[in-house]
Image: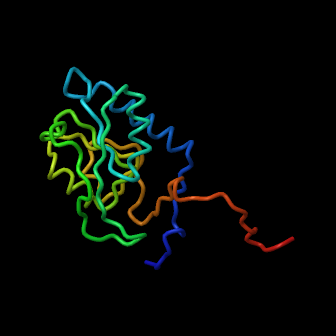
């Protein structure tokens, strides 16, 4: 196995692709909540889960949206996950009827922590890696464990010189 930098095996997600995938996730979740198919609320895992959660909330007409803030990465290095901010406790209960949404499940450590807090919530992500897949009930696309996903909020448009040099 070769040592690669994260960008050398990258999966680049545009805003358009993220929107399509979040709508596909909403379609997959529609009608599958415990209250005659409805969901009580959405909890987005900040920061990556906020954009997909907003789109899913719109598509499923869910008006109650909260966040849980977990820190498990320092730039591109993963560390021990811990909660920085919790959602409303009265709303959450054990998680019944709550959709917990994130952009990606990687190792599964973040969702494992949230699942311990809200064991009856439904966990959904846009993208899933093999190690984290057991932590989610719903996802759209699986990518290999060694793929680094570049989300649109991490990117900037700028000139890139052709790989063969200047003309």
The image quadrant of residue 12 is bottom right
Point out the image quarter for the C terminus: bottom right
Quadrant in the picture for residue 130: bottom left
The quadrant of the rendering that contains the N terminus is: bottom left
Q: Position of residue 111 (x, y in %)?
A: 25, 54
* Quadrant in the rendering for residue 85: bottom left
Q: Residue furthest toward the top?
A: 36
Q: Position of residue 107 (x, y in %)?
A: 30, 62
Residue appearing at x 13%, y 39% in the figure = 93
Residue at (23% x, 58% y) in the render: 83
**Please, which colouring scheme is shown?**
rainbow
Residue 87, given in percent of the width and then of the height, sits at 24, 45
Q: Nearer the viewer, residue 64 or 115?
A: 64
Of residue 151 and residue 106, the one placed in the foreground of this image is 151
| Left or right placement of residue 126 versus residue 40 in this view | right
Q: Position of residue 165 (x, y in %)?
A: 79, 74
Residue at figure coordinates x 20%, y 57% from the top left: 113
């Amino acid at each position: 196995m070769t040592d690669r930098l994260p960008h050398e095996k990258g999966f680049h997600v545009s805003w358009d692709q993220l929107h399509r995938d979040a709508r596909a996730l909403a379609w997959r979740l529609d009608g599958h909540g415990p209250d005659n198919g409805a969901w009580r609320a959405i909890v987005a895992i900040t920061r990556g889960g906020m954009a997909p959660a907003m789109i899913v909330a719109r598509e499923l007409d869910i008006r109650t949206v909260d966040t849980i803030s977990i820190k498990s990465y320092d730039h591109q290095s993963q560390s021990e996950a811990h909660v920085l901010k919790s959602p409303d406790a009265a709303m959450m209960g054990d998680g019944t009827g709550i959709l917990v949404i994130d952009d990606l499940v990687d190792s599964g450590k973040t969702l494992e922590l949230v699942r311990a807090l809200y064991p009856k919530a439904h966990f959904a992500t846009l993208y899933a890696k093999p190690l984290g897949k057991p932590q989610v009930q719903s996802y759209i696309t699986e990518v290999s464990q060694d793929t680094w996903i570049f989300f649109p909020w991490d990117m900037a448009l700028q000139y890139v010189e052709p790989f063969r040099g200047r003309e």
